[in-house]
Every structure is written in C-alpha cells, then in structure tokens.
Image: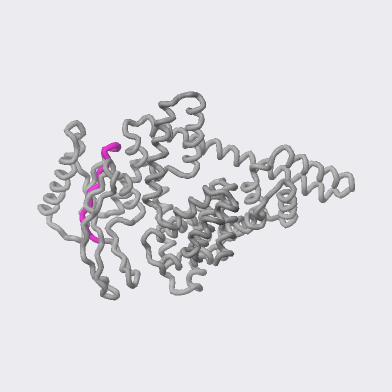
Amino acid sequence: MTQPTYPTVSVTCPNCHTRFAVPVVGLIDVGQNPGAKFLLLSGQINVAVCPRCGTGGRLAVPLVYHDPEKELFLTYIPAEMGLPETEQQRIIGEMTNTVISRLPPEQRKGYLLRPRNFFRLETMIEEILKADGITPEMLQAHQARLDLLNRLMQAADAEARRLIAQENDGLIDEEFFRLLQANVELSYEGGSEETRQRLLALRRELLEWTTVGREIAEQEEAIRDLGERIDRKGLLEKLIAAARDQAQARIKAMVAVGRPIIDYLFYQQLAEQIEAAEAAGDEEEASLLRSLRETILELTDKLDAEAREEIALREQLLQQIVASDDVEQAVMANLLNIDELFLYVLENSIQAAEQAGRQEQAKKLSQVGDVLMRVIRESQPFEVRLINQLLEADYPEGTQALLHEHRARLNEQVLELMGVIADDMLRKGQGDLAHKMLQIREQAQKML
C-alpha cells in the first residue's frame, strides 16, 4: 500500500519570518490510509514548525475524516476561518463528493450523506477516540498530562521546571513518562534537533525531581547493575543486597529482568541461604531472606499473570487479522496495537501451524509478518531501524559488528533513545529485551 502525497502551502514564520513549505491534508480516509489516523491523533497533521527557530502551530484548514469500518464521517471547518454558512456547506459538499466518488457502489451507505461537522479539531478527535472505546475520563487524564508536558517545555529555566514538576508530582506517573518517550521518538522522525535535546534533558531532570522518576531511575540502575552476564547466584546476591537496602524498586526491576532464571534451582539456592542463617541463629537474616522469597514469589506470579493476559490479547488480534478478507488492510488498520509481543505471538503461531502441517494457515500468518516487516522498515527512522537490527542480532559478536558498521552515525542521542526504549521494555515486563538493550548501549558508548 503506497503512502499518499499531499499538496503543500507556503508559510511564513511569525517569529523569524522564514518562509517554508508545509504539507496540507484535507482528507483522512482510514480505509485507504490507516496510518494517517495515527498522525492525526498524535498531532502531526496540518502543523507548521519553522525549520529555523522551531516556532510551531496548527494550520486553520478544513479536514474530513472517514472511517468506513466504524461508519464515521466527520468534517472540521475551523471556526477561526470565519466562513459564512453557504461557504461551509459548499466545502462540506465537495468533501463528501470526493469521499463517495472513491468508493465502489456497494460501499456507499447512508451515513455518508449525514456528515457531522465540528468547529474545533479537539472535539472531532474526541469523537474519533470515543468510537475506539476511549472514555472521557481517559481523554481528560491524557490531556492533563499533555498540558503539563507543554508547560514544562515552555518553562523559562530549570528552576521553573523543577517547581512545576514538584507541584504536579502525582500527575508525572508512568503514563506521563510514556507520553514523554513518544514525543522523543517522534522527534527522530522530523522534529528539530533542539526540540529533541530539550525533551531528553527534561526526561533526565524528571528522573531526578519526581517520585516515579526516581523509581524509574532506580530500576534502570538495577538493570545496569546486573551486568552483561547474569546467573542465578549473581542475581540472588544482588537481590539480597537490595533487600537489605529496602530498595523495592530495584528488587522489582531485577526480578523482571531475571525472571527466566528464577526457577526451582534459584529457589533452592535461596532456601539454602535461609537454612544457613537459621542454623547460625541469625534470625534477623533468616527473616529478611524469607520476606525476600515472598516478595519474589508475588512479583513473579504477577509478571506471569500479566504476560498470559497480554499474550491472549495479541492472539485475539492476530486471529482477527488472519480472518479478514484483506490482510494488508487489517494490518494497517491495527498498527497502533501491534508491538514486540504481537510479533512474538505471530512467530510462535507460524511455527505451530507449520509443525501441525496447516500450510494454508502458515501461509496467511507469514503474509501478516511480511506486511508488518515492510511497514516497519518503511516507516521507522534510521536510529530505530538500527536498534531493531541490534536487538535481533546475536550478542555480543553480532551487535558489535553492526555497531562498528554504523559507527559514524552513533551519538549521544542514539544512546538516549536506547535508554528510553529499555525503560519502556522494562515497564512492559520484557526484562530480557531491556537487559540486552542496555548491554548494547554499553557497547555503543565505548565507541563514542
């Protein structure tokens, strides 16, 4: 599926008077271009950002949104355009005819003749999200985090940012850090270098200034502390040290990373230490170790339950895509819901189908994988493509070779992105990947 090209308009920056071209989108048809929905919801449609000074703002241009699956046909005529009613109706009529003319006769339904008009883009976006099952409360919470991020980015200096962060400590939660990370990643796809650096600097500050930030920083430090090669004995020693320091965040992070080797042998080693402490009459040490064992059991049970639930959701999505008449269209329509775990489920499903001799099912599953790989390769910036290649390569020889091949393009920004991605993996319970990402980051750091 080829991505559409859009006409451009010439814009003059109100701050530095630089003239530059901006693409203008008048129609978003999710049935034809599902990726445009993500661009709209993430604030990347009809936005002008000066390439010289970074001043940006939304363009006041009409927009039509069409989602045939949900039978949504929405039009947006900016109130600031001040158009008379007759002109608004003319524009809406032309937009409606454009959409209808692109559809085959059997898809021309009655809802297309009753477009819902909006004068504020935010209200139209709320309607789109509502159709996706996003509640008003969720929207309000997201908007509050977005407003806070904008306030922090616009603060005059570090002291002003620190005061804002401390006043809003409860709002700067894990969801806020995910929002911040999303903006960092988007900045690699076309944002200014200055904006990217300010976002990365803000993240470093919030890791120090906020309650959740300090927990995340401690988790990242715990992952680094585990080192490149983790074994049961080393993991147990570091967990005991963290328990003595009452560092619950470190324990949680290390359990997430070390989950694959927290098995019968691991618990046997822990039991031996408990017995040794009891035999030595050191009840304080024995009590600490018993408490640590209970904590590890609770954390692993929770991790396993979350993993099963997440896998079930990905399996359900995969079944929906495979059952669709147009696999490519179904993949594009669900891009926002496809992640690393989905790819893991897909790979396992292909193997299971091949082993069971279900060749037709294996072929369709492989088609899903082919579409995804093509879309991913085409849409990702170089830095993200490189990181994905590194995660797929064998550590340490394969990753070292890849890093050496692209050494000229390694910089502090790439290292920052690796750290952000590792943090996100950890929060998703992907401890192994997070650990590998940080190991690769150490390799890259040595090349700078």
In-image side of 348 versus 264 (left or right): left
In the image, residue 51 above or below residue 367: below
Residue 60 among those drawn in magenta: yes
| Residue 435 rendering spot, x and y as whole percentages | 60, 52
Quarter holding residue 132: top left
Front residue (pair 324, 54): 324
Spot occupied by residue 67 in the image (x, y as percentages of width and height): 27, 41
Name the dominant secondary structure of the magenta segment.
loop
Q: Position of residue 28 (x, y in %)?
A: 26, 48
Quadrant occupied by the N terminus: top left
32 drawn magenta: no
In the rendered image, the residue lying farthest to the top is: 357
372 up-or-down from 118: above or below: above
Q: Which residues are magenta?
A: 59-71
Identify which residue, 51 or 365, lies in the foreground: 365
Q: Is residue 371 above or below residue 356?
A: below
Q: Quadrant of the C terminus?
A: bottom right
Which residue is painted at 32% across and 31% down in the image?
325
Query: Going 67% across and 42% down the picture, which residue do you hit?
Result: 261
